[in-house]
Each structure stands twice: as C-alpha cells, then as structure tokens.
Image: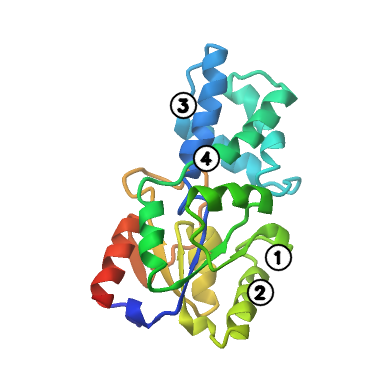
Amino acid sequence: MPAKPLRSFRYLSFDVVGTLIDFEAGLVGSLRSIAAEHGVDLDGEAALALYRTARYTPEALSFPDDLARVYLEIAPDLGLPVDPALGVRLRDGVAAWAPFADSVAAMARLKQHYRLIAMTNAQRWAFAHFDAALGHPFHAAFTTDDTGTEKPDPAFFHQVFAFVEAEGGSRDDILHVAQSQYHDIGISRALGMTNCWIERRHDVAGYGGTIAPADFTTPDYHFTSMAALADAAAVEFA
C-alpha cells in the first residue's frame, strides 16, 4: 500500500514529454514522414533506439533543439538523407506533437483537486506548445530554460521545492508523476518524494527512446495511464 492517500497531496508535479505528450509517437511519426518521401520503410523501435544513443552524448544540446543534430547522426543508419534542413524539420515538428489520448481529460479532472506543476527537460518554446495542447492545466511550470539543468539533476527538483515552500508547502505535499524511471522515478525517491509511475510502455518491451535506469525503482503508485490516476483520485475525493 502507498504510504500516503492520494487525497493528502496538495500538488502533483509532472514530467511532460513522454508522460503527457506522446513523445515516441511524435518522433517516430516525424521520421516516418521523411522516410515516406524517400521510399524508406522505417522501423519505429529501431529509430527510438538510435535516438536514445544519439541523444545522451556529451555533445547533446538542449531538447528539442538537439533534434536537428540528432537527425544528422541517426539518418545514415535509417537510410535517410543526411540533410540539415530535414534535421530542422524534425526539430520544428515538435510543436505539433500531440498529447496521449487520455492526457487532456485527466489533467482537467486532476486540476479540480490539486495544483499541477510541470517539470520538463524541454525548452520553454516547446513547452508553450505542449501546454496549449494540454489545455493550459498548470499552476506553475519549470523548463530546462528556467532551471538551467535537466532531470535527474536534484537541482531541478530543489527549485520546485523552493517554489512550493514559498506557497507554504513542502515536498511532502507533492506527488511526482512521470513515466521515466531514469529521469524521474529514481531521483524523486532519492529526494524523499512520493511518486507515481505512469508506465506508458506497459505493453511494449524495453525503454524505447528513454534511457534505461541503472536500477529499477518500485514506485509508490503505479498506473498504465493518466486516466487511471485520475480515476483513483476521483474515488478518494468522492
């Protein structure tokens, strides 16, 4: 049983890309669009594996600007043209990445009971598009541009703690909700937060485009969709 009931939290903090926004569908869809124009049959899981390797390197830039560089690195292995203009197209396509089918409704329901905080490794320009697609549900938002760092750096989380403390709360008032074991679930546990793992890839093997954690962290709460989290919260607030 989780240590704390869902109704005891004042805040829900969220990973955005991969938890609320369908990052893998957006990335693969953009690559498949380019591939179709050049007569290439693209394997989505292979593309995600190549992306993961290319993304997490010392020369990586901030996301999603880094997609222009990543494209040039993975294009040869995918049989796609090594064309900087296509890298820019991949990066700019992020603006159209869509939420998961359950995200908008779930966030609207959760907003009735909690203050929602975005915690995203995306740059502010991309988050603005994601926020609009989600229906502007957030009480506050922290991007890599705001924090100067990326999860799983504890410094990112400490800036959120400071914000909550300025409103009279503490990290104990926050339930951290995310799909990434590496970026979110492990570090939130290390920092003493209660967490909720949204296992978006529950029906697919592996970690897809997200780096695998060194160690798996058993979450306090575990759902395979945002809808299930919203349902569970609704029961407790009924």
Kindly report the distance in space between the C-alpha atoms of the residues bearing marks 3 and 2: 39 Å
Mark closest to the chain's N terminus, 4 or 3:
3
The total number of labels drawn is: 4
Q: Nearer the viewer, mark 4 or mark 3?
A: 4
Q: Are marks 3 and 1 in contact (CB under 8 Å)?
A: no
Which residue is labeled 4 in the image?
A: 97
Residue 129 screen position, x and y as percent: 58, 47
61 or 119, nearer to the observer: 119
First in sequence: mark 4 vs mark 2:
4
Question: According to the image, label 3 marks what residue?
Answer: 43
User: Mark number for residue 147?
Assistant: 1
Q: Is residue 160 left or right of residue 99?
A: right
Residue type highlighted by circle 1: Thr
- Three-letter amino acid code of the residue under disc 3: Asp
Q: Amino acid at mark 4?
A: Trp
Q: Which residue is depicted at the point 66% across and 38% down?
A: 67
Mark 1 or mark 4: name the one nearer the start of the chain.
4
Label 1, residues with CA under 10 Å away: few <14, some 14-19, many ≥20: some
Residue appearing at x 50%, y 47% in the figure = 133
The vertical placement of 93 against 56, above or below, is above
Q: Residue 88: image x %, image y %? A: 70, 31
Label 3 residue SS: loop
Task: State the mark number for residue 159.
Answer: 2
In this picture the colour scheme is rainbow
How far apart are labels 4 and 2 at the CA level? 27 Å
Whole-Å distance between the Cαs marked 4 and 3? 19 Å
Q: Residue at x 55, y 37 (%)?
A: 96
- Determine whether 44 is above or below 237 in the image: above
